[in-house]
Amino acid sequence: MSAHSDDELVVLFSQGQNDAFEELLMRHKNGLYQYIFSLVKDDGTAGDLFQEVFLALYKHAADFKAQGKVKSWLFLTARNKSLNYLRDHKSLTSLDEQDEEGNEFWHEILPDGEISHLEQLTQQENFERIRQIVASLPPRQQEVLYLRPYFSFKEIAEMVGKPIGTVLADCHRGLEKVRKILMEQPEVEL
Amino acid sequence: MTCKQALLYQSGELTPQEQEAFKKHLATCKACQAQIALASATEQSLTAPAAPAEVVDRVLLKTTRRPTVWSRFRTVFVGSVAAMVALAVGVGTYVRHQPVTNAEFVMYMSQTSQNEYATLSNDLDLFEQMY
Ligand SMILES: [Zn+2]
């Protein structure tokens, strides 16, 4: 099953192969759950919305026109459900909020010491810290960072309905803040 | 302007020509190297955690591994039959010591069967609510 594309899995599943559905679930569960959680910030709600997304896929696979869009469909469905949830709970202020900080580029600001430090970041102990810092960013920056491992900037721009330049700027600002906080407290123990 | 292309280079969205030009720039630009390193580390850190197993199991139990009506019914049914057998053995033992009339025995059995049936239908109602 793992050799099949998402589209092929949807077809196989709509023909009655349950293991094709399970492969789709296994393939996308982690990214989708983390993305939903990053939007709603609550484990119980994230679990419920995650379930709704996959139940929708399960029920509608037969009339699903996949065409290379299964992953986008999953994430967009998750996004709509999460935003509806936030709207119903009156906490949807955030995804449209402006972040008016500057857009400086790194070559203007980076001392040499920082650069070698940044290049050491692929160590496991830094990952938890990066996740915590990302969780403190403005929602739009968080969203781009969470979608980026699964989609190109062009695809993200289509999904969130913003120009690609805006999406790039959000990503850049988000990373810039992650960098600043990492550099300000390089030795903080968690 | 080349430094602005670092994120698009990392996401593989530059044209082949832009990509070649950026590669040359990257070899000498420490800031772009650092930004790309941080972008990759951030991606890795955000993709590392797994979805909770309990959440994934819940989806499986409502879709491909949903218990069938029969498998659930069988559990209830086998339980009921076992209860009936135990009851009959009990009644049989009782009968040997203290003779009862046929009418009393039939009355007793039909009452207890009704209780069993009531329990069974409660179980089925609960089951329908759950799924
Ligand atoms: Zn550069």
Image (cartoon, rainbow, N blue to C red):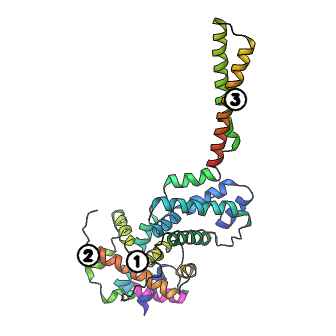
Question: Can you see residue A44?
Answer: yes
Residue sticking out furthest to the bottom: B1
Residues beneath discs 2 and 3 located on the same chain: no
Q: At which x and y percent is residue A154?
A: 55, 82
Q: Quadrant of the rendered structure where residue A161 is? A: bottom right
Q: In this figure, which residue is indicated by the disc labeled 3?
A: B114
Which is nearer the eye, A11 or A74?
Answer: A74
Residue occupying image coordinates x 56% and y 69%: A81
Q: In this figure, which residue is indicated by the disc labeled 2?
A: A184
Which is nearer the eye, A44 or A166?
Answer: A44
Location of the N terminus of chain B (image quadrant)? bottom left
Distance between the alpha carbons at the discs numbered 3 and 1: 63 Å
Q: At which x and y percent is residue A153?
A: 52, 81
Residue occupying image coordinates x 58% and y 72%: A76
Q: Mark 1: few, some, or many residues within 10 Å (few <14, many ≥20)?
A: some
Q: Do the residues labelled 1 and 2 touch (CB within 8 Å)?
A: no
Q: Mark 2: few, some, or many residues within 10 Å (few <14, many ≥20)?
A: few
Q: In this figure, which residue is indicated by the disc labeled 1?
A: A138
Which kind of residue does numbered mark 3 sit on?
Gln
Up/down of A19 relative to A174, above or below: above
Q: At which x and y percent is residue B6?
A: 44, 84
Distance between the alpha carbons at the discs numbered 2 and 3: 74 Å
Q: At which x and y percent is residue A27?
A: 57, 61
